[in-house]
Amino acid sequence: MIYWLGSKGCYAVGIIQEVFMSESICSRNQTWNMGLVLVGAAALFLAYIALRRRS
């Protein structure tokens, strides 16, 4: 799932990057890193929402 999220994230970044640059290919490691960043961002967002509800 992390790799899938990373590939979708790389695809989205690739679309934006193609507007400004011609090359937009993510390596396998970059795809995993992107997936971890997206999962981490989602976890932080959910934790923030949970903490706001408790307050």
Image (cartoon, helix red, strand yellow):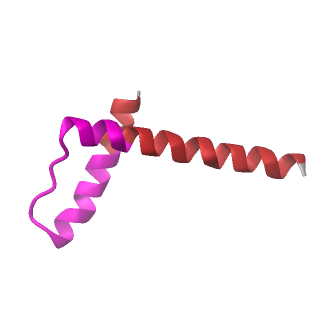
Taking depth in this image into account, of 27 and 18 the one nearest to the observer is: 27
- The count of marks equals 0
> What residue is rendered at 26% in x and 43% in y?
30
Q: Is residue 32 left or right of residue 38?
A: left
Q: Seen from this angle, which residue lies furthest left?
A: 22
**Residue 33 percent across, percent down from the top left:** 34, 41
Q: Considering the image in quadrants, where does the N terminus appear?
A: top left
For the stretch drawn in magenta, what is the main secondary structure? helix
Q: Seen from this angle, which residue lies furthest top?
A: 1
> What residue is rendered at 67% in x and 44% in y?
46
The answer to whether 32 is drawn above or below residue 21 in the figure is above
Q: Seen from this angle, which residue lies furthest bottom?
A: 20
The answer to whether 30 is drawn above or below residue 55 in the figure is above
> What's the magenta region?
9-34
Q: Quadrant of residue 28?
A: top left
Q: Is residue 47 left or right of residue 26?
A: right
Taking depth in this image into account, of 27 and 9 the one nearest to the observer is: 27
As for residue 6 lying within the magenta part, the answer is: no
The answer to whether 23 is drawn above or below residue 26 in the figure is below
Taking depth in this image into account, of 30 and 17 the one nearest to the observer is: 30
Q: Quadrant of residue 42?
A: top right
> What residue is rendered at 44% in x and 45% in y?
37
**Residue 20 percent across, percent down from the top left:** 18, 72
